[in-house]
Image: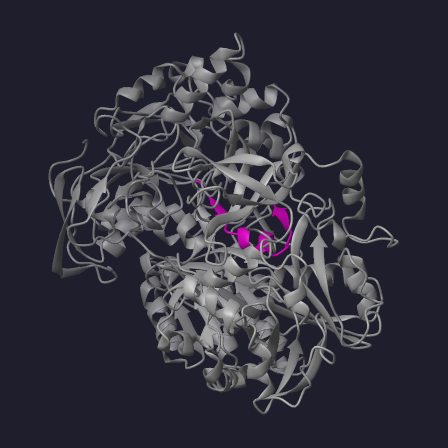
Amino acid sequence: MAGDSHNQRLKPQPTELIDRNKSLEFQFDGRRVNAHQGDTVASALHAAGVAILSRGFKYHRPRGFLCGAGRCPNCLVNVDGVPNVRACTQQVRQAMNVRHQNAWPSLNLDFLSVLDRLQWLMPVGFYYKAFHRPKFLWGLAQRVIRRVGGLGSVDIDADPVTTYRHRYHHSDVAVVGGGPAGLAAALGAAEQGVGVTLIDDQPELGGHLLFNSKDFSGLPDLADGSGPEVASKLIQRVIESANIEVISGATVFAQYQDNLLTILHGDELVKVRAKSVVLATGTYEVPLQFQNNDLPGIMLTTAAQRLIHLYGVKPGNTVVVATVNDQAYQAALDLLNAGVEVAAVVDVRPTYSHGLEAATTLISRGVPLLTGHAITHATGKKRVRAVVVASVSPRSPDSPARRITCNLVCMAGGFQPANALLQHAGGSLDYDEKSGEGIPHDLPNGVYVAGEVTGVHDLATALLQGRLAGLEAARLVSGPGSNQEEIGRVRQRLNGLETEPGIIPSSPVSAPPVEAPTESRGKKNFVCFCEDVTVKDISQAIEEGFEDIQMLKRYSTATMGPCQGKMCLKALVGLCAQQTGRTIGDTGGTTARPPVQPVPLAALAGPSHMPVKRTPLDQNHRDLGASMVDLGPWQRAHSYGSPQEECLAVRQRVGIIDVTTLGKLEVTGRDAGALLDKVYTHHFSNLRVGRIRYGLLCSDNGTIMDDGTVTKLAEDRYFVTTTTGNVDLIEEWFNWWQAGTGSCAHVTNVTSAYAAVNVAGPRARDTLTKLTDVDLSAQSFRYMRSAQGAVAGVPAILLRIGFVGETGWEIHVPAEYGQHVWETIMEAGREFGIAPFGLEAQRILRLEKMHVIVGQDTDAASNPLDSGMDWVVRFDKEDFIGREGLKLASEQGPRNKLVGFIMQNWHVPEDGVPVVSGGKPIGKVTSARFSPTMNKGFGLAWVPAELAQDGTQISVLVNGVPQPAQVALQPFYDPEGELLRQ
């Protein structure tokens, strides 16, 4: 493990986030590391002198602290078994166990680092070009590449460390970004009385102001002060505002249609729906390109400032600061004040901005400022030891290169706006030559931008932009006439400020990569730290014809790693433009897609449990001692003791079952019948009022989707039942085929509006006659008829149907009266020996009638013709969904058929066991039970069509042994249906 042996803690800093009075200890690769409360894993390791945090993806080169803000891949570690955790944002917990990734056997000695010397074997896109002949070679190479590639690995045997929850939140205005512009936007909107949600991905609000020690003056509505002082005043105002809710330490990783933001906040995934959104997401500082620019000890200037000001850690002993802009001069001054020797500031520009106070101070303290120079390469193995600096000025092309000894290099390669969320929302960007950045061009309705994401790097301008964006976002919520005067005043101040010279930097903040001297050729100059893509790789890909930026990205894999282009997109586009002779604007950029930051799959999946639905009769079942079972989202009574006895109660006396979970839809309107004709295989427009018809739904190809009953309550009103788990799908299916037709049909899901029970058995009529004035006689209330009337004094829909094979009625009542109706029926049936029966008894009873359960006895390939339901398919209809598929199936004939079977001995097979012949499976049992009526095992099974004959002998596997059974094509109980019609 490379690093300095002494502690790198500085004296306490006024802006640090750590609490030095609270000490913590954790392990890194078995080594004990001390930390303070508030430290990140990376800051604590850096303070302990640990330079190497990880190894590179492809070449396994040592990598160290780079960005300090969770934007790069260098700090990915395994924390307590969780892979790919960003050490620079993960706060230390007592006794946490941190381990390295992508190195074996250790970070200090990684055997796979030999790949760094084999780069000639792995040019860009090598996996597209090699291992194709002989054919078997790719199979071998693929396994090796998959084993060697990648970063962290998932322990599939480990228990989940974190259980994620989902939360939904609504806000008038959502502000993304807690820097100065975001704070100003939140305050501006909140002053107008609207609700504001302020989201920031850092542990503390303030953005770059927290580690910017520069003194600011002339700020709008704020006193002069340093960056932390300005931040403190803004934060205090936010805290005091009753209209602002702050969610810090939270990553907004996507923005979807209609201002839906998805946020990862600890163990919560929060979905925020806002009426308007302000994006004040700032910028990412990016690295420079030079040979060996990935060595540990080479980091961004903002990373060094974070270490100093937020964590009280000295980044190194001797530093070279390399820059393309003015920002790095303040960073150099901060390093100098922290006790770091500044060997030189190397600026690629001919000169820094006139009147730059930090530069003047550095000169006065003896720091060499090398303008018109750039680093060509760095030296060192496990940490940077020196850099070579050369002139890039055309006035001195032959100026000798110089070597500067250092153990720290701070890079300021310019800024890349954090505009991915804006692109998610549909916004577009234009490249601005002045700032060297892509700035927002067209904004979607309800989306506003402010701050550095707009290409502005002046605090006063950012504050005014933020306030203006907040006011406009609030106006969208409150109405066009609100705060118009204040908006005009702020806009006037902003226009005046932006016309002053020097406010927006006039020099570019990026520059083309510097050509290295001849002696350094062959070393690696990295563009993409995630995927180990070099400048040479990009050049080679372009030479091979991948000149389009989108194709170049895919071929080279640059920007496709964990950072998603945050560190490398600017350089990639610049190189592509430079080598193809185009402007950066013409070159364009890559497409930003969600998520902006990697998100655990567990967070997207959410809680492992499903929401539980209970029927209005749930407590009644529990009071009767029912064992409950999950059926889709519902809990249902499985049995009340003995399913066999419950079956006999229904067959011999009377039983009652809760069927509230059935899906229930009302289809109304003058064209309701036509819609049902379209989606069902049977006729329904010609159904008479008060009649019921069995309905079967098929998909486009004729396979079974769902079944149920359709009852015509009035000329323009149908009551439809579906299977328990499919009602939402069927509702969508109806609406899908209704949409755009212009017909008058309306589909309403009334599942939760009704409680329902089925009362069945020889004494069912006797029981219900005591509770209703509806004539239940066989002559007046025939099978497959319906009526509306009162049951137990409650308005009800009565359906005479026979799923369990006995005289019975399905009764639907308002859900609020479900318990009353159940209890009243139980009391009325007491003299007839009424008994509740559960799901298991119902399945035995329906199986005796050979009634099919869709999804149990059918699958995604089953059609009605093979399933014994051809009687419900009406080819005489002009059209219905699935007609052509069924017509083709009819012409081809069945390969397999669903049949009943009865065991020839005492064995009872399990659901799903095979039907066998000659020791080979030829079919499958879909449902099987023991029948208390027949005292035998029986069921339904799919068998080859040639065996689907009454009385055919088949063999069913029971406990691994074939057992004899006989095919039955008629229902096992009451085959003629006489009992249903009594």
Q: How many marks?
A: 0
Q: Nearer the viewer, residue 542 or 135?
A: 135
Q: Residue 543 location, x and y as percent?
A: 60, 19
Q: Residue 147 location, x and y as percent?
A: 37, 25
Q: Nearer the viewer, residue 256 or 323?
A: 256
The residue lying furthest to the top in this view is 134
Which residues, given as a range, are shown in magenta?
A: 413-432
In the rendered view, does 687 fall on the left or right side of 241?
A: right
Q: Residue 498 location, x and y as percent?
A: 57, 62
Please report the residue visible at 46 percent of the width from the left and 26 percent of the height from the top: 534
Colour setting: one colour
Q: Nearer the viewer, residue 948 or 477?
A: 948
Image vertical order of residue 123 relative to residue 407, above or below: above
For residue 426: magenta?
Answer: yes
Please report the residue visible at 51 percent of the width from the left and 13 percent of the height from the top: 130
Image vertical order of residue 542 relative to residue 976, above or below: above
Residue 466 visible somewhere in the drawing: no
For residue 153: magenta?
Answer: no
